[in-house]
Image (spheres, coloured by chain):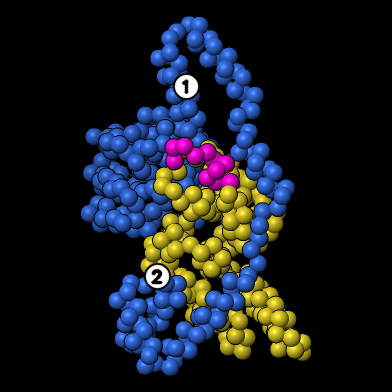
Chain colours: A blue, B yellow
Amino acid sequence: MICLEAGRLLDAFVDNELEPADAANLQAHLASCAACRQLLADRESLGRLVRHLPYYPASDRLRAKILRISTRPRFDPSLLAWAAVLALAVALGGSVEIVRFARARHGAETTAAVADEVVGDHVRALRDAHLFDVRSSDQHTVKPWFLGKVDFSPPVEDLSSIGFPLMGGRLDHVAGQPVAALVYQRRLHPINVYIWPAVDRTAASDTRSIRGFQVRHWIRNGMSFWAVSDLNDAELGELVRALQR
Amino acid sequence: MPHQTFEEVVLPHLDAAFNYARWLTKSDADAEDVVQDAYVRALRFFSSLRGDDARSWLFTIVRNTWYGRFTRAAGPNQPTVYDDVKHDRPDDGLDPEALVMQQQAVERVQRAVQELPTDFREMIILRELEGLSYKQIAVVVGIPIGTVMSRLARARERLQAILRPSAPPRGNNRDLS
């Protein structure tokens, strides 16, 4: 092993993140290289200092606020209204309707919340000019890129034949979970298509407009899809239909 | 996460969430705002929490919340200023006590960490203070594990360079990955 390679492995070694074989090779090198031993000692003394850095705990005031947030829904006055609607539903119909209605209400809230998130993410990705982790119009390059980065395999299809060239993709996070984001383009309008396993209870399909962005959502083969763009809804619909084929 | 409530799963990580936000924003008030927003979002998306690593999940939300609120203009790409570290080198003082020396050393490190570009600072905090694995950091920051490894190494190199006042820092602060 040469010093350059040893230097590359040093931090993972200090952090106990090296494969055993790499660790053994590095140790063999350290035994014979005083310069790299010095680097290791420097890293270890830095680690000792850094672990004494102040840890900032939440203040009691913040803790009280957070507690209020996390218990609020139980005492939400709007629940009273909701209870009244439920009572009406009981009077009018049967239990099946109630269950369906309850699901729909929950689904509608989750759908709205996720729609907000994807639009926020779309805006951030554009603002920070971070649309691509993998930049390629080749679906056979983009799809395998997600291997090992997410625990599902997103369908990836280049649609340049109908005027929506695939530009690339990236790993992103929506609602705290890793998602695959594919980027298509029409003229100068980028389109983000977010894909993840459909485990959250959103509506099966949705169309809405948020802050001037068009949002389309659908579920297909157990995957949840969200397309966001500043493109007009008719053209975005073309892309959505192509992806649903 | 079937039989556990939000209070049981997410509330216990409040200190960790605040510590992370505090080091990201470098301000108590901003960190409180970020954590409060993050908890509102976490509550909304609690049903989408998969697996049992609630802390990493919460960190991801804290980070996204912070990222959404504060533009990166004032963040990682800002040139680093080394001046105030030079003014209070511990060897300027003459206090002989080891404890005081240690305290001064920690204060120097604290200032040095605050000077780091945000991309580097959060690596140090997530690894050294929160004790996250490379895999967990990769999830929270949204980068491949290989990048975690190289970015953490660069962060420590940069930190050592800042703490070594005579030697000018070398190289650029961006990852190559």
Is residue B7 one of those drawn in magenta? yes
Q: Which residue is mark 1?
A: A102
Answer few, some or many: residues within 10 Å of disc 1's Cα (few below 14, many 20 plus, some between 14 and 19).
Answer: some
Asked if residue B7 lies left or right of residue A125, the reply is: right
Q: Position of residue A12 (x, y in %)?
A: 41, 73
Image quadrant for the N terminus of chain B? top left
Q: Name the residue type under label 1.
A: Ala
User: Where residue A130 sits in the image (x, y, percent)?
Assistant: 44, 56
Write down the chain letter for disc 2. Answer: A
Q: Can residue B150 be seen in this snapshot?
A: no
In the foreground, A161 or B22: B22
Tell me the element at label 1: helix
Chain part drawn in magenta:
B1-11
Residue at x 31%, y 56% (from the top left corner) = A148
- Closest to the observer: B128 or A153? B128
Q: Which mark is residue A17?
A: 2
Relative to residue A125, is residue B89 drawn left or right? right
Task: Please tell me which residue lies in front, A164 or B36.
Answer: B36
> Along the polypeptide, which appears first: circle 1 or circle 2?
2
Does residue A17 appear to the left or right of B6 in the view shown? Answer: left
Q: Nearer the viewer, mark 1 or mark 2?
A: 2
